[in-house]
Amino acid sequence: MPAFTATADLHLDRYLVPFDPRRVPHYRFDVVVLGSGAAGSLAALTAANQGLAVALVTKAALGETNTRYAQGGMAAVLGMEDSFDAHVADTLEVGCGLSEPGVVRRVVEGGPLAVQCLLDLGTSFDRTEGGAFALSREGGHSHHRVVHSRGTATGEEIQLRVREAVLEHEGVSTFSEQFVLDLLSDEDDRVVGVLCRDGRDERVAFLASQVVLATGGAGQLYRETTNPAIATADGVAMAVRAGASVRDMEFVQFHPTCLYIAGAARVLISEVLRGAGGVLRDRYGHRFMQEHHPAAELAPRDVVSRAAFERMVATNDTSVYLDLSDLDRDPHRVFPGVSSICRFFGIDIAKDPIPVRPGCHYQVGGLWVDKEGRTTVQGLWAVGECSSTGLHGANRMGSNSLLEAIVCGQWVGKAAADAAREVPQRLIVPTSRREGPPAPPVQVNVADLTYSLKSLMWRQLGVERGGEGIADALDSLAFWRRAVGQLPLVDAAGWELANMLTTATLIALGAQARTESRGVHYRLDHREADDAWHRHLVQTPISSGVGVRALELRSEELFEQTIRS
């Protein structure tokens, strides 16, 4: 099969909002990091430990991140019976042929030191009575290798400790409640800073020769999601406007077990509960996962999500049910957080089945980066969920994301710091629309349009998707992008919608191009994996003087990518 190439119209303005660079106050640092989750915080701390001045800029409060909501834990080889080879093999298998072995091994072998790094920051992990780590097992893992805190509060514990560390570090200056509107570029298209709207609704710029994106994923693109409200794909969208390439955007992971009660916010019911012995049943009490995979409830997440979705359709129900009644331990004591949430809705997890259904959980694809975290745009780095490192391939294995955040966060922080010493800061003269579009002749309900987008993505680009539905979605997205592009975007709701529409289009274009099923990408009209698609799919912006006019989509042979340094 020849390499796939295509182009698609995008027509993005270079900058999301009009601004006059002469009237924007600015701060100068050596490195600017966007995002204070595990990946961003470790990048900031590592760069600051090199003696550089670092700005850590966050969209919400410093502790409000995707990391905070991570329940399951962090995978690392710590048990005597486990090995790096086994962890690598598991990750490659779950990645369905698109995980890159060199990257996988490098991250996996960094696991023990990543755990020690967190311990040094004061992180407390659950232990056995003998003092050893209480390791759990999750889907796709062949061994018990997941460290966790208070059962399902791992992310909360890690976020607390990294937050304390960045606040205490003299080299890190934190700026919370800053909505980052755009990356700023110089006349050579090198990223040299960011433009923000601060808490007083004023523009401010943070300038640096190196900018690190650790902005998390795109969970809010979907009606059913485990992600917090901040996960609106801002980092990916602003990077594409600045000319950065993305890779494998069609791969979006759905977690199989979100608490589903009509009218209530979706809450993740961690995979740890299935690892402890919880089983999935349908409305008639039938345990169905044994029919889909030898590992049953501990199959990879894409398999469990599709099985749950299919069972909901087959039984005409809005959920399936997680049954903990046969656990050999008291689930109230082992999983106090889940117990408390369910008790609020009158569910006793020791005897009552928990209604669950799949929800958008993790952006597997992202900004295309090299082994140190460089994007295809000079001066710009990416780490964590917004990046595509080659670790996850076509399907992320549970608890590998926190591992990636800690290990890669340190790599990127050091590499960005080294680059900052070599590259002097430069004055910027960014081009921008000096005036925004006029008020439209009709009133546009941004909230309603956002909900329509989330519903469209769930229906047409969710757990299952097909060619006809993807094409319909692309038509709707193009229509909405044109409409939103003519609006004077004046607040966070409008800016987020514009970013979500851009990222949704990238996902849909990738899904349309990849005519096979692989990992989390499952097409009803191409149900099997195709060896010809044993390759990554890269989307590269084609820029003009005023913005991104189109995208070039091309396939990349596995392990043969090159990134402009």
Image (spheres, rainbow, N blue to C red):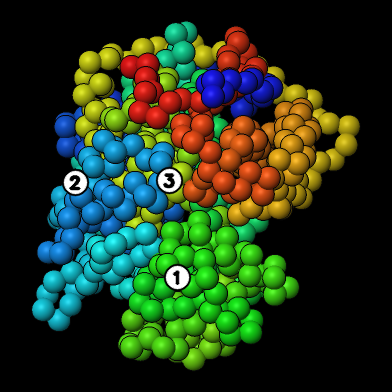
For the residue pair 60 and 322, the one nearer the viewer reads as 322
Would residue 138 be found to the left or right of residue 106 on screen?
A: right
Q: CA distance from mark 1 to mark 2?
A: 27 Å
Q: Nearer the viewer, mark 1 or mark 2?
A: 1
Outermost residue toward the bottom in this view: 351
For residue 361, above or below residue 1: below
Quadrant of image for the C terminus: top left
For the residue pair 308 and 487, the one nearer the viewer reads as 308
The residue tagged 1 is 297
Q: Amino acid at mark 2?
A: Glu
Q: Element at badge 3? A: loop
Q: Are marks 1 and 2 in contact (CB under 8 Å)?
A: no
For residue 510, above or below residue 377: below
Q: Amino acid at mark 1?
A: Glu
The answer, for residue 554, to whether it is visible in the render is no
For the residue pair 78 and 501, the one nearer the viewer reads as 78
Q: Are marks 2 and 3 in contact (CB under 8 Å)?
A: no
How many numbered markers are drawn? 3
Q: Nearer the viewer, mark 2 or mark 3?
A: 3
Quarter of the image where one finds residue 259: bottom right
Going from the N terminus, do you reach mark 1 or mark 2 first? 2
Residue 107 in percent (x, y) is at 25, 43
Q: Amino acid at mark 3?
A: Cys
Residue drawn at x 19%, y 46% is 110
Neighbours of disc 3 within 10 Å: few (<14), some (14-19), many (20+)? some
The residue tagged 2 is 109
Looking at the rendered structure, which numbered label has been put on residue 96?
A: 3
Residue 363 in percent (x, y) is at 49, 46
